[in-house]
Amino acid sequence: MNKIFKLAMLSTTATALLLSAVQAQETVVWWDFLGGGDGVRMKSLIERFNTEHEGEITIEGTTLEWGTPFYSKVQTSSAIGEGPDVMTYHLSRVPLGVDSGALAEISTDDLAAVGLGADTFASANWEAGQSDGKQYAVPFDIHSIVLYYNKDKLAEAGLLGEDGKPTGLDGADNFMAALEQLQPNSEYALSLQTSGDGTPWRVFYSLFGQQDGVFLGEDGTFLPDDSIPKAVSAVETMASWVEGGFAPALTEYEGSVALFTSGAAALHMNGVWEVPTMTDLAAKGELGFEWGAIAIPTFFDHPATWADSHGFAIPSNGGKEMTPEKKAAVFEVIAWMNKNSLAWADAGHIPAYSPTRDSEEFKTMEPNATYSVLADTAVFDPKSTLAGVASPVYDAVANYIAPAMNGEMSPQDAIDEMKADLQDQAD
């Protein structure tokens, strides 16, 4: 009997210990929208995190469709308290996320507890995660557009310096002269998306930012009168590349990439996220030329380049409070991802976390290190519920700026109609 009692006690103790271990492990429900090379790298990071935190924290990850479907799902799920514990989020979408009530405010004390704060990120990047001075997202990277180049073609045209990087491209006139030098030995001197919204917006906003243009005034006016000439100049510059036959007309995103990777174009304007494409093709011996990437040239007054960030946000989930243990686990996830973001830089991104960006390991990572100056010259999307990824601003670019690039309407008309369209939606 005594033996049976002891066995029962041992069994009860073992069960209690097991339950205690299970209860001590926090499961963090995670949503992201990352596909392609980004998705592969993020899954690898999640696996590393789970291995290092075995028995303590487990990330339970789900990948949803990028763009509008993701943000619609977040909004509806958060409203009924069924959202994840943490999610990836474009910082350009923060104003709309806050306005719709989908995002929870993030405490600076909670961030400080895991070593994160305003002093660990570039100021513009940190502020891009704010709305009305309150923090709603933590930056993870800075992704911008860059200028990819075919070293062979630039060397042939005398546009490659001794350091192997392009020379003589700054200034709108100099850039046009360079296109003229490159054109004879290429189908196109420059390839970029000239149909749709993505690249046209990113290039326009870069050129506009280089002139200190104001897209959204403090009083809520889109494209205030004194910024209209700057916007027109940006579109005129973009249209001149197509009009001169240096860049292809009415070309979709994928086609613009193919023109460069096939060797048909000497230069290519696109996001840093295409770095893995170039790296992988080169590794397979399928690229056929040496390539590099630099920050977008300075066409106007000073360097400035459109940028956005993948960040981490916490849904409001109908006001449901996290347990202290869950909250600690969520912030450990956010901090760990930033502190291990060198692996994320393999996707072409610039780490948002300053200690990683300033590390010797990152400084020797090419071509990222070459264009990492973008962290200091980045211009983020205007803070508006109409701006950001898959927004009315992007729609307006497809409806007005892209047609102007292709000679289907004048740059002045394009800007006037875009201004009127966005103002009507805002009022």
Image: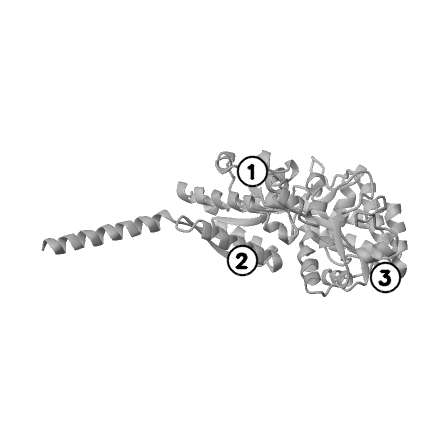
In the image, which is nearer the foreground, mark 1 or mark 2? 2
Residue 167 appears in the picture as rendered:
yes
Q: Earlier in the sequence, mark 3 or mark 1?
A: 1
In the depicted structure, whether residue 214 falls above or below residue 284: above
User: For the N terminus, which image quadrant?
Assistant: bottom left
Circle 2 sits in a helix, a strand or a loop, which is it? strand
Q: Which mark is residue 186?
A: 3
Judging by the rendered image, the residue that carries numbered circle 2 is: 63
Q: Which mark is residue 274?
A: none
Circle 1 sits in a helix, a strand or a loop, which is it? strand
* Dot 3 amino acid type: Ser
Residue 83 appears in the picture as rendered:
no
**Left/right of residue 109 with respect to residue 324 in the rendered view:** right
Q: Earlier in the sequence, mark 1 or mark 2?
A: 2
Q: Residue at x 13, y 56 (%)?
A: 4
Residue 408 x %, y %:
84, 57
Could you tell me how far apart the alpha carbons at marks 1 and 2 are, in whole angstroms? 24 Å
**Left/right of residue 307 with respect to residue 241 in the rendered view:** left
Q: Quadrant of residue 196?
A: bottom right
In the image, which is nearer the foreground, mark 2 or mark 3? 3
Judging by the rendered image, the residue that carries numbered circle 1 is: 135
Q: Residue at x 47, y 45 (%)?
A: 330
Could you tell me how far apart the alpha carbons at marks 3 and 1 are, in whole angstroms? 48 Å
* Dot 2 amino acid type: Thr
Give whichever of 157, 254 is nearer the camera: 157
